[in-house]
Image (tube, coloured by chain):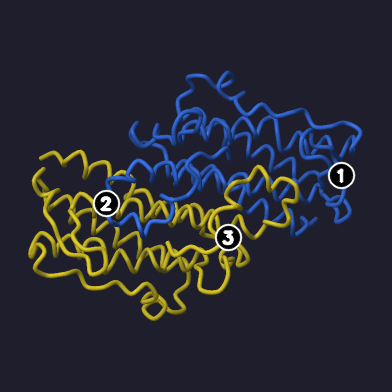
Chain colours: A yellow, B blue
Amino acid sequence: MKLLPEVTEAVEVLARTPELLDAWLIGLSGPWLHANEGAGTYDAVEVVAHLLDDEEVDWMPRLEIILEHGESQPFTPFDRDGFRRRFADWPLERLLTRFSGVRRENLDKLAELRLKPADLERTGMHPALGRVTVRQLLAGWVVHDLTHLAQIARVMAKRYTDTVGPWREYLGVLGDRERART
Amino acid sequence: MKLLPEVTEAVEVLARTPELLDAWLIGLSGPWLHANEGAGTYDAVEVVAHLLDDEEVDWMPRLEIILEHGESQPFTPFDRDGFRRRFADWPLERLLTRFSGVRRENLDKLAELRLKPADLERTGMHPALGRVTVRQLLAGWVVHDLTHLAQIARVMAKRYTDTVGPWREYLGVLGDRERART
């Protein structure tokens, strides 16, 4: 049975993120991996830990809540800093390996759900954002990966904000958010 | 002979970009590869073509101009849309393969230059930005990769700006530049 186009195109992006992160980050030196945008912001390793945390407790579990309970069971609130306890001191490679495994399991589950067009409009209750649909959740999952990929690029780039000198004018990423939650 | 730390850390990032782009983009469907941010902005394939163009005619040739001629020979101006003629109709895979090859050649050349600390302060003349140093050029080359990686994530994410519904509030990349040159 074919997947819905909405599912297929989400999976295209979601399936690539682990390998992309491996190619980008494995073997990078500490100064690149631990650059951040100031107190309370993520470095590249923390982004990976956060993505893993979300992968385990956020997107797929919430999709299952919608399909089983609709709006009657609000999603469990997500603790943005939960990863700091759950994965304290995990080295990058361990985080990446686990992220890759959990992502694959989730995409297998997603395929097995065999969502039908009407399922995309089913609704759940986000504890802060209110009513959301399955369609929105799938898109949010994809864009969440992409916002954090952009963040890794931005955070690494900002190590060199001063070093690039006059080139700064041409390098737009250096002017993007000074602090960013996502 | 060991490379300067400034060269080593630039190469760390520069060497990873081709493989990262392969993992991210090869096999993605047209709607992802050809999403852009409106007229005159790049889609992901155009970003790759632009990176290849820069790799052939911008960063490394300019470094060589500085080392051979100092400020006496201003850099050749870079045509931001030159890639549209040079690589018209090249499929993504061909662009990626060539980018990977030219990047590797340039990093080999960079190692062979055996830059010394004093070389980092040597100056050249940018046709628009004025006096620039080798140190700034190396950092600019790195941040140029990163700004375009952030751009690919941003452009792809914006396909779903409306689709994510209320999640938009949490997905910062959707609020980044509506039009971006770099």
Work out whether disc 2 and disc 3 sit on a shared chain. no
Neighbour tally class for label 2: few under 14, some 14-19, many 20 plus, Cα within 10 Å: some
Image-based side of B40 in relation to A107, left or right: right
Amino acid type of the residue tagged 2 in the rendering:
Gly
Work out whether disc 1 and disc 2 sit on a shared chain. yes
Chain letter for the residue marked with disc 3 in the picture: A
Neighbour tally class for label 1: few under 14, some 14-19, many 20 plus, Cα within 10 Å: many
Give the residue displayed 75% in from the left and 47% down from the top: A166
Give the residue displayed 16% in from the left and 41% down from the top: A4
Image-based side of A6 in relation to A20, left or right: left
SS assignment at label 3 = loop
x and y, in percent, of residue A150 in the image: 48, 52
Give the residue displayed 21% in from the left and 45% down from the top: A7
The circle on residue B165 is: 2
CA separation in Å, label 1 and label 3: 29 Å
Q: Is residue B129 above or below residue A99?
A: above
Name the front one of labels 2 and 3.
Answer: 2
Name the front one of labels 1 and 2.
Answer: 2
Amino acid type of the residue tagged 1 in the rendering:
Thr
Q: Earlier in the sequence, mark 1 or mark 2?
A: 1
x and y, in percent, of residue B4 in the image: 78, 57
Q: In the image shown, does A9 or B163 lie closer to the viewer?
A: B163
Neighbour tally class for label 3: few under 14, some 14-19, many 20 plus, Cα within 10 Å: some
SS assignment at label 2 = helix
Chain letter for the residue marked with disc 2 in the picture: B
Q: In the image shown, does B128 or A160 lie closer to the viewer?
A: B128
The residue indicated by pointer 3 is: A28
The residue indicated by pointer 1 is: B123
